[in-house]
Amino acid sequence: MGMKILLIIPAYNEEQNILKTYNSIINYNKKNKANYDVVVINDGSTDRTEEILIENKINHIKLINNLGIGGAVQTGYKYAYKNNYDIAVQFDGDGQHNVEYVKKIVNPIIEGKVNFVIGSRFIEKDKNNFNSTLARRIGINIISFFIRLVSKKKIYDTTSGFRACDRKIIEEFQQDYPLEYPEPITTVEVIKKGYEVSEVSVKMNERVGGKSSIHSWKNLYYMINVIVSIIIVGNRRYK
């Protein structure tokens, strides 16, 4: 019997993208005889996201208020833990992530090599791969420097939301998951706790609608606070 794999899709005002994203997964399952389950976390959307989810009978959890990416994703991990999934994959609802790469991300976990895998845009250089803006790539490199400083491990794509984890980390994340800066902070935490972490190369697409959770006017604030948070988390003592 194969491992149970869940794709957690946080969605806030994704009426333009969510159905296309969901259908891409269903079509992949049919074409490749895969069995990826899906739960969409509707994070207090104010557009037609909920209506679309209901109309198309898409498995989802509706949050009454907008909790932000951290709260939405933790809700997904709680669902994964309660329903005994072996692997959970964070998968954006905005069309940036390609379901074709899920297999590549989960395989190191299935093979028992690692506990946590990050889908990275920056391991292999590819002009056709969407690598975000120059300013954001500079920010990612700065965050990468501080993660390496506190954890002794180089992480290339520090803000990637395309990630997979095993049952042990599902249990950790469903209990405690940061509301702010969840990707770099949880990466530091799992490394410091002694879990095996790796990156695999993936291609990502540019989002076709909606808004990113990180806005340009917040970038300086984001950078200062995420660096301080990384230093604090990196200097905690873990059992």
Image: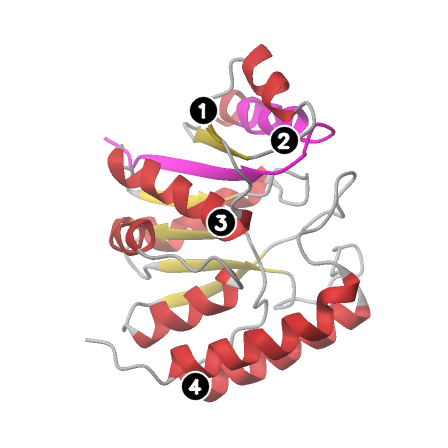
Q: Do the residues labelled 4 and 3 touch (CB within 8 Å)?
A: no
Mark 4 or mark 1, which is nearer to you?
4
Who is closer to the viewer here, 35 or 59?
59
Mark 3 or mark 2, which is nearer to you?
2
Q: What stretch is highlighted in magenta?
A: 1-28
Q: First in sequence, mark 2 or 4: give its number.
A: 2
**Residue type at tag 3:** Lys
Mark-to-mark CA distance, 1 and 2: 18 Å
Q: Name above or below for residue 140 compared with residue 164.
A: below
Describe the element under mark 3 as helix, strand or loop: helix
List the residue tagged with mark 2.
21
* Residue 31 point in image, percent of width and height: 54, 23
Mark-to-mark CA distance, 3 and 2: 18 Å
Q: How crowded is mark 2: few (under 14 residues within 10 Å), some or many (20 or more)?
A: many
Mark-to-mark CA distance, 3 and 1: 16 Å
In the rendered image, residue 217 lying in the magenta stretch gets the answer: no
Q: For residue 140, say whether it is visible.
A: no
Picture disc at residue 150: 4
Is 128 positioned to the left or the right of 166 in the image?
right
Quadrant where the image shows the C terminus:
bottom left
Mark-to-mark CA distance, 4 and 1: 42 Å
Who is closer to the viewer here, 34 or 75?
75
